[in-house]
Image: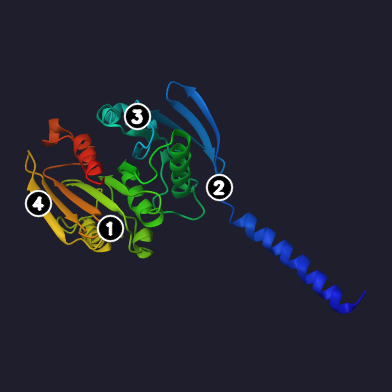
Amino acid sequence: MNPFKKAVSLTAVSFFLLSGCVKKDTEKLQLKNVMLKGGGSFSCTFDGVKHDFILDMPDNTENAPLVIILHGYGDSAEGMRNGIHFEEAANPLGYAVVYVTGAASKKDRTAANGWNSAAFPDDNKDTEFLTALAEYLQKKYSLDKNRIYAAGFSNGACMMHTLAEKADDTFSALVCDAGYMQKSIWDSRKSSNVSFFQLTGEKDDFVPKDSDGTAETNPAPSIEKVMAYRISSINADISESCELKGGSVLNKYECSDTHKQVWELTVKGGSHSWYSEKYNGFDANELVLEFFEAQK
């Protein structure tokens, strides 16, 4: 065989093999084994990790907005649903709502359900999972791909800041109730083009704040710094401030060009909870829906 032809042949084979490896390594993971368990409850797997989710659908799903709701550490989709019943207010307005159960971290000996909000590369791929779930539901039920939203509490709320940085091409608006941005996400942050609503209790020590000094002993950035970054990321140039019943102050910022928004609520006397009218003077469900409605 001609040595030149042999060399070309070997090069072609090497290129083919390498191309195959690259394709395999970058192949997008998909939602698998989606099974109906009963009613609106489903199970599925993603990257070998099992998840449950509960769907509450409006009468018409065609071009309906979707809200994905994440629980706090150690909870579940069912527990979160029973605790807030967001769907009761959202479904009549035409929103599809899905509550999702997280999974145990490989680094956590308690085996409690949670979310990889620090996006550790060798742990559960929760950003990719939630993106895949959103795309699956959008296609299956013909939902509006431009109105895919998410909201979370505590550990699930921390996940909102992660999604804002790593999945803003999928999610157009996010709500963080009693959560913060992990240091690893802050250190690798980019200019995120997503509408964002942060609810923070004055007495919530879980969220690092400059206002009460809790940020001094926490490696994560203060919520004040994070929200200043969120506002600058969308080039907000319009602001509005109002006081809610109970004394909580809501600040709204908007970009006049894109109409992207950042809302920031400091809950007067608020602790670590999904805020309610009974204890805080306002209903978080109603306020979150008001935020989503403002994104139209």
Mark 3 or 2, closer to the camera:
2
Q: Residue drawn 16% across and 52% down?
A: 252
Instruction: Determine which residue is flagged by label 4.
Output: 241
- Contact (CB < 8 A) between labels 4 and 3? no
| Cα–Cα span, label 3 and label 1 | 29 Å
| Cα–Cα span, label 2 and label 1 | 34 Å
What amino acid is labelled 4 in the image? Answer: Ser
The residue carrying pointer 2 sits among few (fewer than 14), some (14 to 19) or many (20 or more) residues within 10 Å by Cα, namely few
Q: Is residue 205 visible?
A: no
Q: Does 141 sit above or below residue 124? A: above
The residue lying toward the viewer, choosing from 68 and 135, is 135
* Between discs 4 and 1, the one toward the N terminus: 1
Q: In which quadrant is the N terminus drawn? A: bottom right
Rendered location of residue 280, percent (x, y) = 13, 37
- Contact (CB < 8 A) between labels 2 and 4? no
Mark 2 or 1, closer to the camera:
2
Instruction: Determine which residue is flagged by label 1.
Output: 218
Rendered location of residue 219, percent (x, y) = 31, 60
Mark 4 or 1, closer to the camera:
4
Looking at the rendered structure, the secondary structure element under dot 1 is loop
Q: Residue drawn 77% across and 71% down?
A: 11
Mark 3 or 1, closer to the camera:
3
